[in-house]
Amino acid sequence: MSRSPIQSQHPIALWLFLCCAMIFIMALLGAVTRLTESGLSITDWAPVTGILPPLSKTAWAKAFAAYRQIPQYQLLHRDMVLSEFKNIYFWEWLHRLWGRLIGAVFVLPLIWFAWRRKISKALGLKLLVLFALGALQGFIGWYMVMSGLSLRTSVSPYRLALHLGFALLIYTLLLWTALDLSGTKRLPASWCLRRHGWASLALLTITMIWGAFTAGLHAGEAFNTWPLMEGEFLPSAALTILPHWHNVFENLAFVQFIHRWLGPTTALVILSWVWRLWNAGTDRRWVLALGATAFAQVALGITTLLMHAEITIAVTHQAGAIMLLSLMVVNLQRLMPHAG
């Protein structure tokens, strides 16, 4: 008995869902790497030989000597010893290794499915684009690290935001493709309802990108009160950089101000969409999950701020953001007409 087109696509969908899960974990490893200030511990880019960490005392001494040449060590960590260096090296090495594993888990099954003629030309083109974006993301990661090796003690917030933005783009496209292949039920929806969903997704993406600027400037470690910022709605320190538009991206007070109010605003826009979805007769399990996650994410954001961006809470906050993004995609994809 022949299999239906949807059934025949299930293995491919499961493979892409696995890749999504690995990217999810990659983002959390990136958060830990950033919060532990581990991202600059490896000062070269060796896509092949870098798979293995230093395996001898000589190799460790060489890696530590390279780290001691950059401003982060010279200005912030001059009292660091080799055992401490090994701790931060581990997180950056694991982050890069996981990226390589994602590449292998994507490419090898892709070759297998293509060889077995399980992938249509249209799907194959999509997957090749995703592969190219993944390769570009690896270069962007190194481009980000380079910004912290000569003049700065940390990576550029602009490059960090670019790196996160590309990760979110790849994750969203991959998840959407997997949902398409899994044969999820669609609900005919008005253009107005879909537009509301796309606007919510766009606002959520902007909020997450501003989270990258907040993290890049260590802005979450300052003004740790809520709702006011040390007694002020907008601190006077928020407009001290000239020209003034630079404050939006480079002034930690203003960047935190934007992110702390983008979060609740985004949640309200999403919750208004949740209310419309609920009344439109969509699958209420996914709608309820989206609404609950929106509430939880705001609470996590406030808790992260009050706890001075403590690592466990901050990483959970990033996980919540990606979960919220995932649920937005799931609910929005169900409103779209079938391709073709």
Image (cartoon, rainbow, N blue to C red):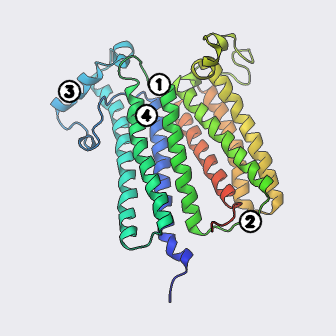
For mark 3, what is the residue? 62
Q: Are marks 3 and 1 in contact (CB under 8 Å)?
A: no
Alpha-carbon span between mark 4 and mark 2: 41 Å
Name the residue beneath numbered marker 2: 187
**Callout 4 amino acid:** Thr
Residue 36 location, quadrant:
top left
Look at label 1 and name its amino acid: Ser
Q: How far apart in space, not on screen, are marks 2 and 3 (Cα)?
A: 59 Å
Residue, disc 1: 156
Tag 3 or tag 4, which sits nearer the N-term? 4
Locate residue 136, reporting x and y percent.
42, 43
Q: CA distance from mark 4 to mark 3?
A: 21 Å
The quarter of the image holding the C terminus is: bottom right
Establish if 335 lies above or below 196: below
Question: Is label 4 or label 2 in front?
Answer: 2
Q: Quick one: label 1 or label 2, which is nearer the N terminus?
A: 1
Which callout, 4 or 1, points to the residue nearer the camera?
A: 1
Work out whether residue 292 or residue 279 is closer to the camera in this orientation and state it. Answer: 279
The residue sitting at 46% across, 58% down in the picture is 127
Note whether residue 39 is visible: no
The reply to whether callout 1 and callout 2 are in contact (CB within 8 Å) is: no
Residue 113, x across and y down, in percent? 40, 69
Residue 305 at x, y = what percent? 62, 27
Q: Which is closer to the viewer, label 2 or label 3? A: 2
> Circle 2 — which element?
loop
- Going from N to C along the chain, the mark reached first, 2 or 3, is 3
Frontmost of labels 3 and 1 is 1
Identify the residue position indicated by label 4 in the image: 33
